[in-house]
Image (cartoon, rainbow, N blue to C red):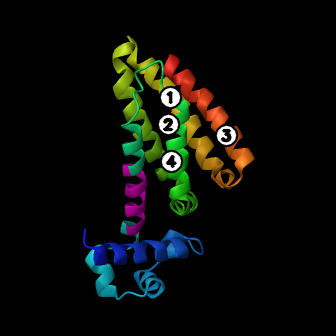
């Protein structure tokens, strides 16, 4: 991607993030985003069709990074390296903390959580489905654990800034992942 295009998209993304910290998505306008990003309306429309498209790009960037992390782990192994997996996920959360904070507070939080759960469920179910006779029962179990993981991360996003709380959260998530790998 051309650096100028990336720079412009970043300006628009960061402007949208700043605005979403002040007001809900439903009242956000293209004009406000353009003013905040210091770009023209025509420039905005070269990259996006509406403010929701900007939020969609935020979702996609987080989803691609999370998928790339998950692709490096074998969830079908009983020796899943939960420490490494969680370290990588925590790194991503810290790297995208502004995205997470906005996506969890913009009124889209349930959609964002649903998407995170879907990414994790798809990866774990695809890697483990062959191990179980009752796939529906396994699906419920995975859904329960993944919901706990995602809700725990999302509900405690502010703890990623406190090392003691982060370590406690890490320990509990590791226990859940280790349990998942052993079923």
Lower sequence index among marks 3 and 2:
2
Q: Tell me where residue 69 sits by quadrant.
A: top left
* Of pointers 2 and 4, the one earlier in the residue sequence: 2
Residue 26 relative to residue 154: left or right: left
- Sequence-wise, the earlier of marks 3 and 4 is 4
> Distance between the Cα atoms at labels 3 and 2?
14 Å
**Which residue occupies 56% across, 24% down?**
178
Marks 2/4: CA distance?
A: 19 Å
Magenta residues span 54-64
Discs 3, 1 touching: Cβ within 8 Å: no
| Mark 4 vs mark 1, CA separation in Å | 24 Å
Residue 113 numbered mark, or none: 4
List x then y, in percent, for residue 24. Answer: 55, 70
Of 74 and 22, the residue lying toward us: 74
Marks 3, 2: nearer the viewer:
2
Mark 4 falls on what kind of element? Answer: helix
Point out residue 104 in the picture as x, y percentages from the top left corner: 56, 57
Q: Can residue 63 be seen from the camera position used here?
A: yes
- Residue 110 seen in the current view: no
Q: CA distance from mark 3 to mark 4?
A: 18 Å
Magenta stretch secondary structure, dominant: helix
Say which residue label 3 marks. 169
Residue 65's x, y, as percent? 40, 50
Q: Nearer the viewer, mark 3 or mark 1?
A: 1
Report the disc number at residue 81: 1
Q: Residue most toward the right?
A: 164
Q: Are marks 1 and 2 in contact (CB under 8 Å)?
A: yes
Q: Is residue 135 left or right of residue 100?
A: left
Q: Which residue is mark 2?
A: 85
| In the depicted structure, whether residue 178 falls above or below residue 103 | above
- In the depicted view, which residue is nearer to us: 59 or 1? 1
Residue 21 is drawn in which quadrant? bottom right
């Amino acid at each position: 991607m051309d650096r100028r295009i990336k720079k412009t998209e970043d300006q628009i993304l960061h402007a949208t993030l700043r605005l979403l910290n002040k007001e809900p998505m439903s009242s956000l306008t293209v004009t406000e985003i353009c003013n905040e990003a210091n770009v023209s309306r025509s420039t905005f429309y070269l990259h996006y069709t509406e403010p929701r498209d900007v939020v969609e790009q935020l979702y996609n960037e987080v989803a691609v990074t999370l998928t790339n992390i998950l692709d490096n782990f074998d969830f079908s192994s009983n020796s899943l390296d939960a420490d490494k997996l969680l370290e990588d996920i925590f790194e991503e959360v810290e790297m995208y903390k502004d995205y997470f904070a906005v996506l969890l507070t913009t009124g889209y939080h349930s959609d964002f959580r649903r998407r995170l759960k879907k990414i994790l469920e798809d990866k774990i179910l695809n890697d483990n489905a062959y191990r179980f006779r009752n796939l529906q029962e396994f699906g419920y179990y995975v859904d329960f654990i993944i919901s706990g993981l995602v809700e725990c991360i999302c509900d405690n996003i502010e703890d990623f800034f406190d090392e003691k709380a982060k370590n406690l959260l890490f320990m509990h998530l590791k226990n859940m992942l280790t349990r998942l790998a052993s079923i």
